[in-house]
Image: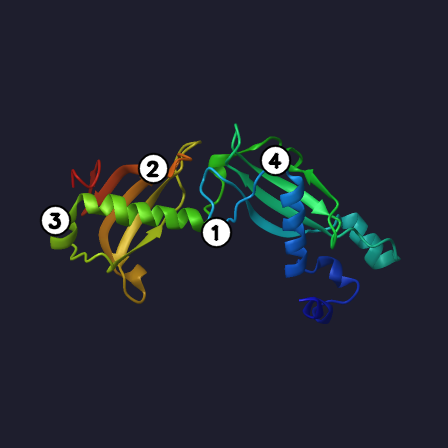
């Protein structure tokens, strides 16, 4: 990664170069040692866990960049912008930190209120891949089995021949976290083969066992759940 970074960027343009894998690892190690909370791997995290959603370059301030590029000023500090999910907190939230200086981080600064004027409620967080997989598990192993005859006789469902796509937004009012899961034939280009069944899954609770169906749509009609359908 280091050789690639040096090849693609000059000494000057390097201040805008994306973080290397080594830098990301160093940021992650620093946060695990200094945030004072247990951080789970985002690929396995439950909604009730703490984890790191993203690590990216914190672009240097424009004035400092121009002073360095055009007038030979001091090189701006290289820093990372980190988005953290804190589900295992009395008040779950999303927090942004500036971590630096790279390559050996020594500080982290909470910039959430500075950027957004207040804390970010936890329900506003983007989906993790882990949460998507948890939603699919609930759909296929809890929701669809409640209507086995319908699934088999009407949709010819064999447990593997339907795929689901999530939609946005995840709600219509502040605090909502419910997603329509639209089912398709599980074939190449499956999104061209809808079967007409959509399930609205409420996944707002931090306890996955409390997730459940809010509504079902099929053949132009709404139902309370799969049992009513």
Percent position (x, y) of residue 108?
Answer: 70, 41
Report which residue position mark 4 lands on.
116
Say which of marks 3 and 4 sits in front. 3
Task: Report helix, strand or loop for mark 4.
Answer: helix
Q: Residues within 10 Å of mark 3 (few under 14, many from 20)?
A: few
Q: Residue at x 84, y 53 (%)?
A: 67
The nearer-to-camera label among 1 and 3 is 1
User: Badge 1, how many Cα within 10 Å: few under 14, some, many 20+?
Assistant: some
Q: Residues within 10 Å of mark 2 (few under 14, many from 20)?
A: few
Between 54 and 195, the one nearer to me in the picture: 54
Query: Which quadrant does the N terminus fall into?
Result: bottom right
| Image quarter in which the C terminus is found | top left
Alpha carbon separation for disc pair 2 and 4: 32 Å
Q: Tell me where residue 168 appears, x and y as whole percent.
A: 40, 46
Above or below, 53 relative to 37: below
Residue at screen point 64% across, 39% down: 35
Q: Position of residue 14 (x, y in %)?
A: 74, 62
In the picture, residue 155 is in which quadrant?
bottom left
The circle drawn on residue 209 is: 2
* Numbered label attached to residue 199: none
Cα gap from disc 1 to disc 3, whole angstroms: 35 Å
Residue 204 vs residue 70: left or right? left
Helix, strand or loop at disc 2? helix
Q: Would you say the residues marked 1 and 3 are in contact, meaning their CB atoms lie under 8 Å apart?
A: no
Q: Earlier in the sequence, mark 1 or mark 2?
A: 1
Q: Which mark is residue 43?
A: 1
- Mark 3 or mark 2, earlier in chain: 3
Q: Nearer the viewer, mark 4 or mark 1?
A: 1
User: How far apart are the alpha carbons under marks 4 and 1?
Assistant: 27 Å
Q: What residue is disc 3 on? A: 149
Residue 86: image quadrant is top right
Report the Cα–Cα distance between label 3 and label 4: 50 Å
């Amino acid at each position: 990664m280091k050789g690639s970074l040096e090849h693609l960027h000059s000494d000057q343009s390097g201040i805008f170069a994306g973080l290397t894998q080594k830098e990301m690892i160093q940021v992650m190690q620093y946060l695990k040692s200094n945030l004072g909370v247990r951080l789970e791997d985002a690929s396995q995290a439950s909604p009730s866990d703490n984890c790191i959603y993203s690590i990216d370059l914190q672009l240097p301030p424009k004035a400092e960049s121009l002073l360095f590029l055009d007038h030979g000023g001091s090189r701006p500090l290289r820093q990372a912008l980190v988005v953290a999910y804190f589900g295992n907190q009395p008040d779950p939230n999303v927090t942004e930190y500036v971590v630096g200086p790279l390559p050996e981080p020594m500080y982290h600064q909470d910039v959430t209120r500075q950027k957004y004027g207040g804390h970010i409620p936890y329900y506003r967080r983007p989906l993790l891949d882990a949460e998507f997989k948890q939603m699919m598990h609930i759909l296929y192993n809890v929701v669809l089995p409640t209507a086995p005859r319908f699934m088999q006789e009407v949709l010819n469902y064999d447990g593997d021949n339907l795929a689901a796509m999530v939609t946005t937004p995840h709600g219509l009012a502040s605090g909502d976290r419910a997603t329509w899961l639209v089912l398709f034939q599980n074939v190449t280009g499956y999104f061209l083969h809808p079967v007409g069944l959509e399930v609205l899954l409420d996944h707002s609770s931090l306890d996955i066992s409390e997730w459940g169906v809010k509504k079902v749509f099929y053949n132009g009609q709404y139902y309370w759940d799969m049992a009513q359908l």
